[in-house]
Image (cartoon, rainbow, N blue to C red):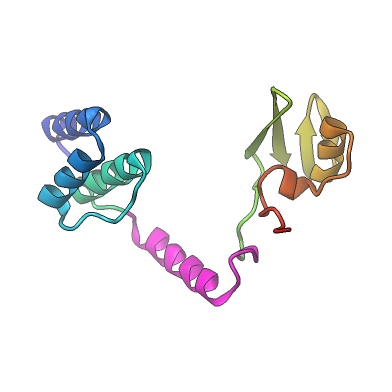
Amino acid sequence: MRSADNSALEAEIARLSDLGLSDLRQVWKERLGTPPAVASIALTRRWLSWELQAHARGGFDATTRRRLRQLFKAFRAKAPSTPLPGIGPRSGNMLTREWNGVTHRVMVLEEGFAWNGQKYDSLSKIAYRITGTRWSGPRFFGLRPQRKS
């Protein structure tokens, strides 16, 4: 992509931050066709920004498109609360959770987790240290949905 084209795209995306939902939908309609029925201004803005970039630069590569199709098929075939294959925290990921006004960050390691300068073999042990009560660590850090009562 040429520098001038890149600058024009960046300027167009920057202008989206000043638009309301109806204006965002109008831009979508003019540039991409029928906009999705999304009620969130923030989500519409992000999605439109991505679509404009994908339209200008070509979108995902073939490997990524293939993986997204696989994930979609797995999601459609299983209950939404079932973890999808190959999805989970990977080494180097940072998990963040705010608890009682304090933000806690946990680094995912090859084997275990690091929090507050110490290594732990489970997220549940870290959740216990943070809260003082027994939690499912993956649930506490948002990796699994909360149970419905």
Q: Which residues are magenta?
A: 60-84
> Viewer-proximal residue, 122 or 61?
122
Q: In x, y percent, where is residue 56?
A: 18, 46
Q: In x, y percent, where is residue 85?
A: 61, 65
Using residue 90 as the reference point, say whether residue 1 is left or right of it.
left
Q: Who's the residue at 73% across and 49% down the image?
A: 139
42 relative to 54, above or below: above
Q: In x, y percent, where is residue 111?
A: 78, 45
Write down the quadrant of residue 69 in the picture.
bottom left
Using residue 4 as the reference point, say whether residue 72 is left or right of it.
right
Q: In x, y percent, where is residue 149?
A: 73, 58
> Viewer-proximal residue, 6 or 144?
144
Using residue 10 as the reference point, say whether residue 118 is left or right of it.
right
90 relative to 107, above or below: below
34 relative to 72, above or below: above
Give yes or no for residue 97 being in the magenta stretch: no
Q: Who's the residue at 33% across and 51% down the image?
A: 38
Write down the quadrant of residue 121 in the picture.
top right
Give yes or no for residue 67 being in the magenta stretch: yes
Look at the image and tell me whether residue 122 can be seen: no
